[in-house]
Image (cartoon, rainbow, N blue to C red):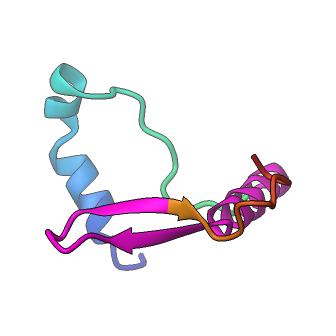
């Protein structure tokens, strides 16, 4: 048998706690992405490219549009 992943060990070990305190639904952790998920991921990645993260002197961050005139994804 293949070596069990850390995630799978954790999910198995915390199963009873998750039933009480968290989501009881358990899905497969190692599956191929569907075509719909690939398209959604590509769309989300394109959406994130239109923003730029700026840092204030106090260390906090905020996002601003890279090109304020581009309204294609908003």
Could you say which is closer to the camera, residue 39 or residue 18?
A: 39
Which stretch did the figure color magenta?
34-63
Q: Which residue is farthest top? A: 20
Could you say which is closer to the camera, residue 50 or residue 21?
A: 50
Tell me the quarter of the picture where residue 53 sits: bottom left
User: Residue 8: horizontal and vertical position, in percent?
Assistant: 32, 59
Residue 28 in the image: above or below residue 56? above
Is residue 57 magenta-colored? yes
Could you say which is closer to the camera, residue 25 or residue 54?
A: 54
Which residue is painted at 42% across and 29% down in the image?
25
User: Residue 20: horizontal and vertical position, in percent?
Assistant: 17, 20
Left or right of 14? Residue 1 is right
Quarter of the image with the N terminus is bottom left
Residue 67 in the image: above or below residue 14? below
User: Residue 59: horizontal and vertical position, in percent?
Assistant: 18, 70
Could you say which is closer to the camera, residue 3 or residue 61?
A: 61
Q: How many marks?
A: 0
Residue 20 in the image: above or below residue 69? above
Which residue is painted at 75% across and 52% down in the image?
40
Left or right of 21? Residue 28 is right
Which residue is painted at 16% across and 31% down in the image?
16
Left or right of 31? Residue 41 is right
Tell me the quarter of the picture where residue 66 sits: bottom right
Is residue 71 magenta-colored? no
User: Residue 41: horizontal and vertical position, in percent?
Assistant: 70, 59
């Amino acid at each position: 048998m293949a070596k069990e992943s850390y995630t799978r060990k954790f999910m198995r070990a915390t199963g009873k706690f998750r039933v009480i305190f968290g989501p009881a639904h358990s899905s497969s952790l190692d599956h191929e992405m569907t075509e719909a998920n690939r398209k959604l991921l590509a769309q989300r990645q394109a959406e994130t490219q239109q923003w730029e993260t700026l840092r204030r002197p106090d260390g906090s961050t905020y996002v601003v549009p890279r090109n304020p005139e581009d309204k294609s994804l908003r």
